[in-house]
Image: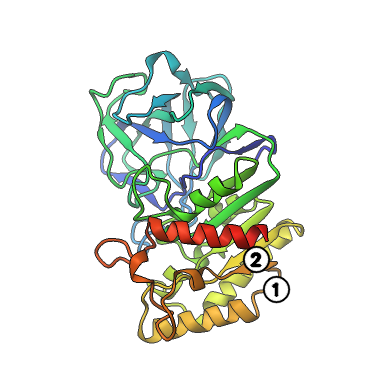
Amino acid sequence: MLREYSSATVLSTAANYIIERPEAFTHTYRTYVRLREQGKLELRFWFSNEVDSTWDRGEVAKGGQPGGDWLIEAAFAADGGTRRDGSVNPDSRVPVTFGGGTSRLVRPGETFWSDPVELTLPDGHDLAFTWTIAAGSGRSVPYNVEQMLVTAFDAPGKHAEDAGAEAFTLSEKKLVMPAWIGYRKSVKRRMVFFGDSITQGVRTAVDGYEYWVARIADGLGPDYGVWNLGSGWARAYDAATDTAWLHKARQGDQVLIALGVNDIDIGERTAEQLLGDLTRIVSILKSNNPAVDIVMFTVPPFNFSGERERVWRRVNEALRTAPPEGVDRVFDIAAVLAQPAPQEHCLRPEFMSPGNDPHPNGLAGKAVAEAFLAWYKG
């Protein structure tokens, strides 16, 4: 990443799915994002045409899979206001350009930057990012298919220039965004939070920014850059293949790794396999930058039972007592979220999401952030 820019939002835009259609299409996407700061900003957008992590069992999307050929027909940054109703301030729209052009053909596996964009956002107002994408049949654009954590709209056809909401409908499980939103900002430390849906913040309130990465960023303030690379269904063995997702994590001065739930669950990894993957991730990061600071999180409780519970216990015991070589510190997130022994493999009831879902809720995000900030600053 360009060192004079820092991550402008705590929203994760990691890609865990890919658009696949039997026919050509043209579609417009508009997303409202709270930035770390408002006022007069110089923004840049970075794009990656590759799936970051595996969704479910990988029938459709796997980590490291390249996207297809597609075209950015037009893109705009604008003042999204506070209503998030599908409209933008018409006088605030600024074209996002690429080498001076308003369109950009994207090739499989490609990464690229936008030109700088100057935009002024009043206090409390969201950035609205709108773009029209066109693609042929087959696989094309990587995106995030998890529960929406911000308000977004989409519309068939070319509507990037529309200020009004008439053409748009509310998006569901369809976050189609650049891989990174940055703003010109000098920071004390570039922190990358590298994890799964629990890091991403899934099941917390839409537009609430209640998840622990967001709360930690608020507690540290904007002088600390925070890039959230949480991705739903992600697992350590996705990262251990050293493709696009881990390449993103390499940009941090400090990488905070919170993986393991999906490896134990859908991945059915043994403790030895999971610890081996975590060790490889740390080794790759340290080889890339020996000075990078690595913080390993214990695996959060996820109401496992049977063999999965036994693996969870063995992995966390190892992380607490003998973490992978190269890990500088370990934060025990499991201890914050868990019920008292002997039920420490289960999430505390007040931290459960609706429907007995063990994804930590906003209250859990508050508890984790408070514990982490006290530990981190101490």
250 versus 167 height, above or below = below
Q: Which mark is residue 325?
A: 1
Q: In this figure, which residue is indicated by the disc labeled 2? A: 282
**Residue found 31% across the figure and 31% down from its top:** 27
Nearest the eye: 60 or 183: 183
How many neighbours does mark 1 have within 10 angstroms: few (below 14), some (14-19), or many (20 or more)? few
366 versus 35 height, above or below = below
Type of amino acid under label 1: Glu
**Mark 1 vs 2, N-terminal side:** 2
Decide if residue 214 is on the left or right side of residue 131. Answer: right
- In the rendered image, which quarter is residue 28 located in? top left
Q: Quadrant of the N terminus?
A: top right
**Residue found 63% across the figure and 81% down from its top:** 321
Dots 1 and 2: beta carbons under 8 Å? yes
Nearest the eye: 39 or 370: 370
**Residue found 58% across the figure and 47% down from its top:** 226
286 versus 343 height, above or below = above
Type of amino acid under label 2: Val
Q: Quadrant of the C terminus?
A: bottom right
Is residue 263 shown to the viewer in this render? yes
Q: Which mark is residue 359?
A: none
Residue 356 placed where, x, y %? 27, 68
Is residue 54 shown to the viewer in this render? no
How many neighbours does mark 2 have within 10 angstroms: few (below 14), some (14-19), or many (20 or more)? many
- In the rendered image, which quarter is residue 23 located in? top left
**Residue found 47% across the figure and 24% down from its top:** 103
Q: CA distance from mark 1 to mark 2?
A: 8 Å
Residue 202 placed where, x, y %? 38, 55
